[in-house]
Image (tube, helix red, strand yellow):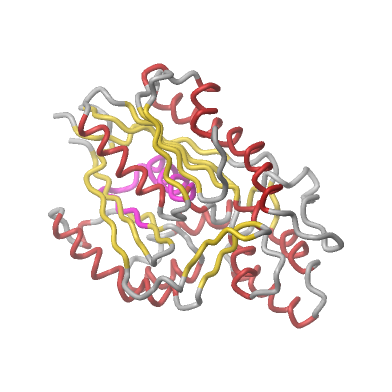
């Protein structure tokens, strides 16, 4: 019997990485106060990140864009860099997904692009059509400025397209260049964002299939009331500014488990039925809080922590990195993925072994 399948995943990171000690030194160079240096070092040390990719880094780990002795780059300059770099990263992830699916580019019917770190028109979607050779009739959808949970929103949209047209082949592409938005201000929440976020791209192919091993069984979403001020992402004159309340982990731990239980029940499952978990690593405290609240085994979120350590928080692209590793390892099914963003909002995805 045909069902909507997650056929393949592709991922890509920038050519050069920035080791966390080097990233710490960059952050400290913008602060003259020794007491701030101690705070910054502690934040970067506790971030759970060991390395992260940046399209701005050169082979020696230097980032020429940000200089303590010059004014912060304007948003316009950062967006020019987004236009220059985003499609290269997106193309690599898409080509990997297409190759792994053995899907000719000409068979793609829909393209869903996702990003919260840059905008341009014509944008990444049209450039991908030209570079990869997608049909000029490809239907395009862009999911913008949603944040870390946008990959699940995109996969839910792809599922709807595929379910309505058995011949549809949907290419999803998330590309985020978070390092374009390094925050020069002394704000503590800005330091937290600087310590966590990174660049990366993830892509997936979705379509109806009788034989693919991974089914997209269901998706869900929730908005937690009275939490809009806990996480925000605003466009400023010198980049996009992230604000993260320290109350986010505890708030998610309180509200997400009961919502997941209700949503799983509607899909005919219980929490104990879940074989594997993919939680977006908004930060190590988010993972720890949710692991405890969901009563997960100590190693249940090991892949989430590993992706955070290896690549940082790549916003929407991160979850596709986690899913790729879990599926490559042929982990037990069903697999529940969840991610969270401004709102506070959450999205969940249930993958099941094809039958």
Residue in the picture at 30% in, 44% down: 156
- Residue at 25 percent across and 38 percent down: it is 160
Q: Position of residue 197 (x, y in %)?
A: 59, 57
* Quadrant (top left/top right/bottom left/bottom right) for the N terminus: top left
Which stretch is magenta?
317-338
Q: In the visual, does 50 lie left or right of 95?
A: right
121 up-or-down from 153: above or below: above
| Direction right: furthest residue | 69
For the point 27% across and 34% down, which residue is it?
Answer: 161
Front residue of 7/82: it is 82
Residue 103 covered by magenta stretch:
no
Q: Of 226 and 280, which appears nearest the observer?
A: 226
Q: Please give left or right for residue 291 compared with residue 47 in the image.
A: left
Image spot of residue 180 (x, y percent): 66, 51
Instruction: Pinpoint residue 345: horizontal percent, then vertical percent.
Output: 36, 63
Q: Residue at x 65, y 38 (%)?
A: 85
Where residue 70 appears, as percent x and y from the top left, is 84, 60
- In the displayed structure, does residue 64 sit left or right of residue 269? right
Assess whether residue 318 is covered by the magenta stretch.
Answer: yes
Quadrant where the C terminus sits is: top left
Image-quadrant location for residue 172: top left
Q: Is residue 214 above or below residue 139?
A: below
């Amino acid at each position: 019997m045909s069902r909507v399948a997650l056929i393949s995943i592709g991922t890509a990171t920038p050519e050069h990485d920035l080791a966390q000690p080097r990233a710490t030194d960059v952050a400290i160079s913008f602060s003259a106060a020794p007491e701030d240096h101690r705070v910054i070092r502690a934040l970067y040390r506790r971030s759970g990140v060991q390395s992260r990719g940046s399209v701005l880094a050169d082979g020696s780990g230097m980032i020429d864009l940000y200089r303590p002795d010059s004014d912060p780059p304007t948003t316009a300059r950062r967006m020019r860099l987004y236009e220059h770099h985003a499609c290269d990263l997106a193309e690599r992830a898409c080509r990997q997904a297409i190759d792994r699916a053995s899907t000719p580019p000409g068979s793609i019917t829909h393209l869903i692009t996702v990003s919260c770190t840059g905008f341009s028109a014509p944008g990444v979607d049209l450039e991908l059509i030209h570079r990869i050779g997608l049909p000029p009739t490809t239907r395009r959808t862009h999911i913008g400025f949603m944040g870390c949970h946008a990959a699940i929103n995109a996969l839910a949209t792809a599922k709807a397209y595929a379910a309505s047209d058995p011949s549809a082949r949907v290419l999803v592409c998330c590309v985020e260049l978070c390092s374009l938005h390094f925050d020069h201000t002394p704000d503590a929440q800005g330091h937290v964002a600087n310590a966590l976020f990174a660049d990366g791209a993830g892509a997936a192919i979705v379509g109806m299939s009788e034989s693919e091993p991974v089914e997209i069984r269901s998706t869900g979403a929730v908005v937690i009331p009275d939490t809009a001020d806990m996480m925000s992402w605003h466009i400023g004159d010198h980049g996009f500014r992230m604000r993260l309340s320290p109350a986010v982990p505890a708030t998610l731990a309180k509200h997400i488990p009961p919502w997941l239980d209700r949503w799983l029940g509607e899909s005919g499952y219980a929490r104990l039925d879940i074989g594997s978990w993919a939680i977006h690593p908004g930060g190590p405290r988010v993972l720890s809080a949710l692991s405890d609240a969901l009563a997960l085994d100590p190693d249940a979120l090991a892949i989430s922590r590993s992706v955070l350590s290896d690549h940082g928080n790549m916003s929407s692209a991160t979850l596709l990195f986690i899913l790729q590793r879990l599926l490559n390892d042929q982990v037990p099914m069903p697999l529940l993925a969840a991610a969270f963003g401004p709102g506070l909002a959450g999205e969940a995805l249930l993958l099941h072994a094809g039958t």
